Image: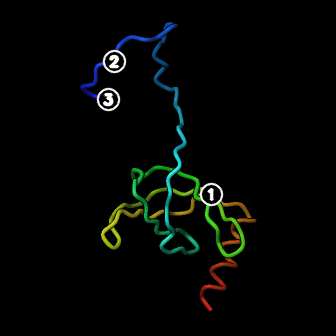
Amino acid sequence: MAGQSWSERRRSPRFAPRADVRCRVDVRLRVLVLDISATGALLATETPPRVGSVALLKSGLGAATFASEVEIRRTGEVDGGPAVGVSFTAMDERNRHILDQFLKKASG
C-alpha cells in the first residue's frame, strides 16, 4: 500500500521469503453467468480479476452444481457494467457431463 505509514506492532520478527516462494490468496467474487458454452463463459462481476488470473467457478446449471477451473481471458463491459470472459481450463468428467447436458437442453 504505497504511501501508507504503518506503526510497528509486530510481536515477533518477520523475514522476507525467498524469491521462489509463491502464495495463493483465494477471494470470493459474486458473478452472474451471462452466457456459457462448452469452452467458456461470460460473467458479469462488480470486481473483475486481472486477465490471466485462475479461479474456480461454481454455479448452478439446471438442477446440478457445476464447477470448473477457469482462466480470465478478457475484461470489458456488458450493458454498462464490468464483465469477464473466461475459458475452462480443468474440468472433471462429472462436471463435463453436467455442462454437456445443460448445453444440450438449452440448444433445443
Q: Which amino acid does label 3 sit on?
A: Met
Q: Earlier in the sequence, mark 3 or mark 1?
A: 3
* Distance of label 3 from label 1 (alpha carbons): 34 Å
Residue indicated by mark 3: 1
Q: Between residues 70 and 49, which one lies in front from this camera angle?
A: 49
Which quadrant does the N terminus fall into?
top left
| Point 36% across, 61% down: residue | 75
Residue in front for this viewpoint, 40 or 47: 47
The total number of labels drawn is 3
Q: How crowded is mark 2: few (under 14 residues within 10 Å), some or many (20 or more)?
A: few
Few, some or many residues within 10 Å of mark 1 (<14, 14–19, 20+): few
Q: Residue 90 carries which label?
A: 1
Comes first in the chain, label 2 or label 1: 2
Q: Which of marks 3 and 1 is in front?
A: 3
Give residue 95's position: percent from left, percent from top: 70, 65
Residue, disc 2: 6
Q: In the picture shown, does residue 5 fall above or below 38? A: above
- Where in the figure is residue 40, as x and y percent of width and height? 53, 68
